[in-house]
Image (spheres, grey):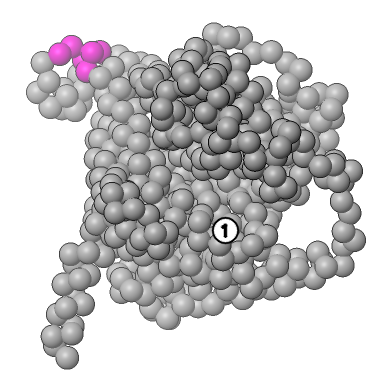
Amino acid sequence: MDVVVNVIETITANLFSQVAILIGIIALIGLVLQRKPVEEVVAGSLRATIGVVILNIGVDIFVGGLVSFQAIVSDAMGLEPPASTSSLADFTAGAGSVVPLIIAGGFVVHLVIVRIFPAAKFVYLTGHLMYWMAVVIAASFVAAFGDIDRWALAGAGALVIACYWSLQPLWTAPLMRKVMGDDEVGLAHTTSTLAVAAGYGAKALRLGDPVRHDSEHLRLPKALSFFKDINVSTAFVIGVIMLVAIGFADAGTVEEQMAGATVAPWVWGLLQALRFAAGIAILLFGVRMFLAEIVPAFRGLSEKALPGAKPALDIPVTFTKAPTAVMLGFLASTVVFLILMGVFAWAGWFVLVPPMIMLFFGGGAGGVFGNAVAGWRGALFGGVLNGILLAFGQWISWGLYSDTAPELATLADPDWFAVGWIIIGLGKLLAPLGAAGVWVIVLLTLVVSVVVLVLVGRRQRRRPVTVPAAQTVAVPVAAGARADGTDAAAPAVATAAGAAARPQPLTVLAVCGAGMGSSLILRTTAEKALAQLGVEANLSHTDVSSARGQHPDVIIAQPTYLGELGDLAPVMVPITSFVDANHVRERLAEKLAEKGWL
């Protein structure tokens, strides 16, 4: 028996506690199950592993910048910097090492729920938020109950997160239908509570008419367009705040944070802002790298095992519907947050840190969903609401997570607060039960989820099925197309004289704001479209900033991102529907034909 225990402990200490290795193993298994060639299995597994290592490096850099930022700003405002006894890096190296287990186990349970309950028709596919919500749930259980057996934490976390992934697209579905025009795509993003609050709040307040006051009839100054780039906007905002804070902070405090640096304080401040932004950029790059291998494996599983299920995708899939609303929401969110920074400092409450990623994506979400209900006034309302939620949520959550991963307060979306606070609140009430309290929370979550899914399923069965006229029209395809949408003449087209000058293979780059959600889905759809066209291609995906340093033959992205990239590639293809293979194929065929490559 001792031998068995030792073997389990050895495996746990050297594999399951090492996030990078475990992610690599998960990727390897996924690729093997898909019967990929040996070279793809090896390369994909290593890329996933390296991605996690890069992610951890980004976390370390970001945390270092966060500490310096809070110390300088606190001193400038005459406040004590927020204290904590742990950090995100410490947590993920300790109790948080079960996060990959939570993700893997939770996704399997999520697929089972989707399979069993007709109401749960959306499969959650925003991979980077799978990771972060798993961290939030693990940290919340530890904050509520202290030390928990790692296997109990993994099991409880997996069940809770599976319920969240199954329910979250459902409560945003009515508003998503307004934004997208149909229900073919669900929302899988941790700004869902904000989206619901912005949409229904704007409607309740009767802020405007979605048609007459549509934000897309407005025009924003081009000079503000640089805020679309998360790296630039983060460095800019943090840099301005740091320079102002250094000017008012005590020289001794600044010197202490500089730790012997020989440059001038203002130069050091600028470098810290750039380091802060670089840490987040590295973190996102690492997440993007390992999810590029894992998410397709999960998606392939869901498509094979769950016919009829629909994808729930990242928030940027909504941004093409109202790009002006996105900017209105982001700017309103940022302005409100910066004002609250001053208010909090004046009141002596807390030193807020501007979470630029969450201000952009959350503000954009509030803008899009507010606009869908009440036009540009609703967009501004959604942005303001996001700024308020992030400010007060950061203040409250820092104290709750100070012994686990306090950075979760400064990197948070509204759903992180909602889910985390519920778990911690219930944990405090159930503290007398000890470890059994964890399973009481899990049982409550499962019961509520089943009841909701059963009730929604009954409601859907009673609702008469109507097919919009637009859906009864056959999708136009090129002459010679097969009934399944593929082009019967594709091989001949690919070898035509006009295609002779086409690079072999074609390098295609899918681009989105963060390079993790919509671009990954678009890459997968484009692979199918190019295969139907008979075009050999190597595809990858990235964010707008990283795209500028690459030289692909073709770039596919939302029109708003193509505008930022100019003529970076010989062929620039605007895409408005990431999951519609027919649409992507038609757009690619049109642009490749214009170039003489098809």
Q: Is residue 370 magenta?
A: no
Q: Which residue appears at 33% of the width and 74% of the height?
A: 151
Q: Nearer the viewer, residue 535 or 410?
A: 535
Q: Which residue appears at 64% of the width and 23% of the height?
A: 590
Give the side of residue 358 with respect to residue 405, left or right: right
Give the side of residue 393 with respect to residue 321, left or right: left
Q: Which residues are magenta?
A: 263-268
- Image coordinates for residue 441, horizontal then vertical, percent: 51, 73
Q: Is residue 61 in sight in this rendering?
A: yes
- Image coordinates for residue 13, horizontal then vertical, percent: 18, 67
Q: Which residue appears at 77% of the width and 36% of the height?
A: 476
Q: Residues within 10 Å of mark 1 (few under 14, many from 20)?
A: some
Name which residue type carries label 1: Glu
Q: Is residue 428 in sight in this rendering?
A: no
Q: Quadrant of residue 543?
A: top left
Q: Which residue is mark 1?
A: 303
- Image coordinates for residue 371, horizontal then vertical, percent: 73, 31
Q: Nearer the viewer, residue 327 or 494?
A: 494
- Where is 441 relative to 392, above or below? below
Q: Which residue appears at 13% of the width and 85% of the height?
A: 3
Q: The C terminus lies in which quarter of the figure?
A: top right
Identify the main secondary structure in magenta. helix
